[in-house]
Amino acid sequence: MADRRLLIVHAHPDDETITTGALMAGYVKQGVQVTLVTCTLGEEGEVLLEDSQHLASHNEDRLGEHRFTELSEAMQVLGVTDWRLLGEPHKYRDSGMMGMDSNNRPDCFWRADLLEAATDLVAVIREVKPQVAVTYDDFGGYGHPDHIQAHRVLTYALSLAAVPSFRTDLGQPWQVQKVYWTAMPKGMIRDGIRALRAAGQDTGFAAMDPEAIPFGVEDSLVTTSVDFSDFLDTKMDALARHASQVQTDGGFFALSNNLGSKAMGVEHFRIAAGAVAGPFDEQGRETDLFNGVSE
């Protein structure tokens, strides 16, 4: 199908590469118009680089500027030329993890007016006219308030964008054909933990009960698995650009690496609107987000 257009909505810089990096790079290579909207600059993130501790929110509070640069570099690696912040820079601030004092800041994304934030996204939807949109599930993957809010904002914006009478100054109505939520199959997590334990590790992820890991999704709920493992090196290169936040040699990435080199290059989704369509893989999952999509 010619002229395929994909909208991806994420909460913070680095989220896009972790869960959809291979997808973005692969689709760009195929000629798909990929648009990324990032809702905040991740100002409340934990700074992993020793020489950048001064940027943290409790020090100079300049982490957002740094993460904007990291995002720019990651998008260059992935080949994504259309990436934007929701609204304008610094309009919506990172809320921090659930229960933190930063959740109470009036400018944080968690407390943003839903209609206002959704209207900011409607303008993008009507401009880009994507056939497919991707964000988190209603739990935000693991309960992060900004991920939950990103889910809410896209869900509301999709409804508003399709209504002819809503803010005609924002462009003509547009109906997205398929909506997906990112997903991490629990089967993959179980396999990864078994591999870590078999390799002699007994701390961190290896010590966890796979059923208790919050971002795991039952395998039966995963409708779509897109294999862009040929772009795994590109994804990991882009992820390395988010150095203030990500260490690819430990934690979740250690779990992923023990699944084999292909694991991080296959990205998984649940369909939330529209219908699944073939071709399907051996597990009965769609192999492409654009299956069944018309121009």
Image: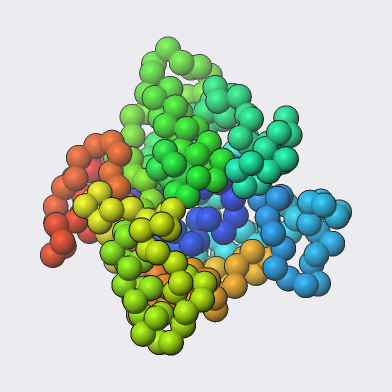
Residue name at image x 27 percent, y 59 percent: 225
* In this picture, residue 97 sits left or right of residue 264: right
Residue 228 in picture, x, y percent from top left: 33, 68
Q: Residue furthest bottom?
A: 200
The correct choice, above or below, for 180 with respect to 156 in the image is below
The correct choice, above or below, for 243 with respect to 220 in the image is below
Residue name at image x 68 percent, y 43 percent: 100
Residue 194 in picture, x, y percent from top left: 34, 76
Using the rendered image of the protein, determine whether residue 239 is visible from the camera's viewpoint: yes
Using the rendered image of the protein, determine whether residue 30 is visible from the camera's viewpoint: no
Residue 189 in picture, x, y percent from top left: 36, 66
- In this rendering, the count of numbered labels is 0
The image quadrant of residue 196 is bottom left
Quadrant housing the C terminus: top left
User: Quick one: 149 or 189, which is closer to the camera?
Assistant: 189
- Image colouring: rainbow
User: Quick one: 11 or 159, which is closer to the camera?
Assistant: 11
User: Quick one: 266 or 88, which is closer to the camera?
Assistant: 266
Residue 136 in picture, x, y percent from top left: 43, 45
Residue name at image x 31 percent, y 59 percent: 185
The correct choice, above or below, for 58 with respect to 105 in the image is below
Q: Residue furthest top?
A: 165
Residue name at image x 48 percent, y 62 percent: 18
* In this picture, residue 239 sits left or right of residue 101: left
The image quadrant of residue 159 is top left
The image quadrant of residue 146 is top right
* In this picture, residue 204 sits left or right of residue 23: right
The correct choice, above or below, for 207 with respect to 213 in the image is below
